[in-house]
Amino acid sequence: MKKLFIIAGEPSGDLHASNLVKELLQKEPSLDIEGWGGELMSRQGVELKNHLENLSFMGFLEVVMNLRQIRKNFKLCKRQLLDFRPDVILMVDYPGFNLRMAKWAKRSGFKVVYYISPQIWAWKESRVESIKANVDRMYCILPFEQEFYGKHNYQVHYMGHPLLDEIASFKSENKPLFKKDKPLISILPGSRKQEIERKLNIMLDAVSKYKDFDICVACAPNLDKGFFEKYKKKYKNIQFIFGQTYHLLSESDYAIVTSGTATLETALFKVPQVVCYKSSHISFAIAKRIVDIKYISLVNLIMNREVVKELIQKDATAIKIQHELDQLIGDSDYREKMLSAYNELIEILGRRGCSEKIARDLLEQY
């Protein structure tokens, strides 16, 4: 493999792809890599052809409202792939775009590799047939996905979860960043403007009574600082920290977390958490009809039981968040049960070295 094109459309994909690129270039320094992603991929040497700030649309309604931009993105990506002619296209998560692009890419003669399986086990299980037809190699990061694909006679590869490496690396290289005088509650509101605007006021209202705690909001680096000004003016005693989520989690005592990768990151830092999710009414109504899963947080999905409390849609209120935080803070047995489950979770995820193993396998295969 001499040329690789990566498509990552979300911050979590940018993070995982950047670590994979680092391992690839250590093994094959002459590898020419272009792609779609963010600053983390760029720092590792990827020539960015489109930034993820132009790519992320959350929810069914939001996708419909941005169809024109999405169509433009498809045309642009196809043109760039035909110009670059990579030996392999590596698609990282971002299923709404990547599964459709995989179909075109396969028909156009490209080798298609997928890293971080789309969550088709939650909805549209029939998409497995499209994946079997259009994806040459699939790397999963959730252990139960091997069994799922096995039922459909499709071999996938589980080499561990990349967050194990990323967090271990962070802990070995970083010292405490904040001087703590009080216990710390961190708020992780997500990385998309739409989800933040629906939930952040609720989250901030929920922590207003905790006068004996420091409160910090982890602001994703892909968002402009000006976006948070209205929240800073309204909630003057709360700190807004940009691009330092792992620093915050490493020193947090409790966390309020938007459902997504952040729930697993919080668990791996062993921080007791409450999970919140709130989308538009239309998007949620559609999702309820087609999504078939018991839980929305990665922690509960992997453990197949409720480890962390999930407050979804109408239950995502300041009062209910407060109630859960009060239990975590005041009931040591309740808190220790969650922390014990975190240890089980780490055992299930397996050994570290995911990015290095996938990089080695990719170079051996292609």
Image (cartoon, rainbow, N blue to C red):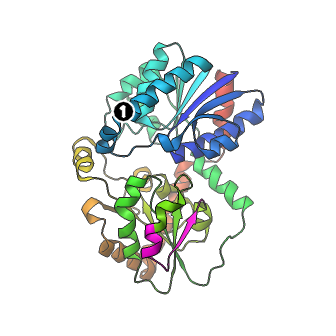
Give the quarter of the figure containing the N terminus: top right
The residue that mark 1 highlights is: 68
Asked if the magenta segment contains residue 237, the reply would be: yes
Residue 6 sits above or below residue 242 on the image:
above
* Whole-percent x, y for residue 364 in the image: 68, 24
Amino acid type of the residue tagged 1 in the rendering: Arg
User: Residue at 35% across / 28% down in the picture?
Assistant: 127
User: Residue at 68% across / 61% down in the picture?
Assistant: 171
Q: Nearer the viewer, residue 265 or 279?
A: 279
* Whole-percent x, y for residue 165 in the image: 64, 50
The answer to whether residue 150 is seen in the rendering is no
Give the quarter of the figure containing the C terminus: top right
The residues colored magenta run 230-243
Viewed as shown, does residue 334 lie left or right of 161? left
Residue 247 sits above or below residue 131 on the image:
below
| Image quadrant in which you'd find residue 57 | top left
Crowd band around label 1 with a 10 angstrom C-alpha radius: few (<14), some (14–19), many (20+): few
User: Residue at 72% across / 27% down in the picture?
Assistant: 31
Q: Nearer the viewer, residue 73 or 15?
A: 73
